[in-house]
Amino acid sequence: MRRTFEWLPSGASGVRRGPRFWLQLAGGILALLNGIALFFYLDPPGGTRKELMQEGVEVRNAIVAARSRTQRLKTVAAEVQVGNVESADFEAKYFLPKRLAYAAVITELQRIAKVANLQQRDWVSTEEPIEGTSDLSLLNIVANYDGSYDNLMHFLYETDRSPMLLMLEQLQAAPQQKSGQLTAQIRFQTIIQEEPAAPALGAQP
């Protein structure tokens, strides 16, 4: 006798499932998937849409601030470089080598006195180290002059225009018995620099 067999889902108790069952099952699965999608939309793992937007704004602000700091650092570095160059130029122009300083200063003061028609008499010089440096010193020149008030003013004017750095540290003036004449004692200062020692012959660089 021929028998007819029908396939049944696993776990079924011999009851045949109709189309309505499968539609309900599909509807339940869709509802579950929609619920999962809604959960991830309302509370995504990385944060809500508002939170992500806020984080994006904070990141952009941090990038702008970092760029601003970088630009400021570049500006400061450029200013430091310019300052170093200007400092080196100033030293080369105004700091006199020690071995040439005394003769150079006296020669310049004599030239200025001659231009101003001021009579230069005696002078003395001293040196004193500049605190905080190892190769710089102050050269002090104290010189005495005779002449008129106009001659002295002309002398000071020419001193101020000198290409050499001559700092007027002290001035004392007193009238002479001769009408219109005075005696002046002026103390000048200039910066001198020790020259680096030349390397010994045969020394390794």
Image (cartoon, rainbow, N blue to C red):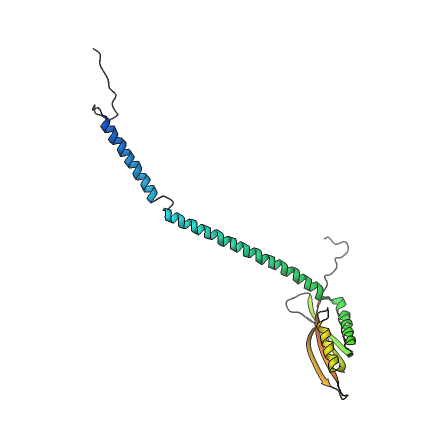
Horizontal side of 61 relative to 43 (left or right) equals right
The location of residue 12, given as percent across then percent down, is 23, 25
The answer to whether any part of residue 158 appears in the image is yes
The answer to whether any part of residue 140 appears in the image is no
Of all residues, the one furthest to the top in this rendering is 1
Quadrant in the picture for the N terminus: top left
Of all residues, the one furthest to the bottom in this rendering is 177
The location of residue 196, given as percent across then percent down, is 72, 61
The location of residue 167, given as percent across then percent down, is 69, 73
Q: Is residue 172 above or below residue 201?
A: below
Q: Quadrant of residue 133?
A: bottom right
Residue at screen point 33% across, 44% down? 42
Residue at screen point 68% across, 78% down? 170
Q: Is residue 201 above or below residue 93?
A: above
The location of residue 187, given as percent across then percent down, is 71, 77
Q: Quadrant of residue 109?
A: bottom right
- The count of marks equals 0
Residue at screen point 75% across, 68% down? 101
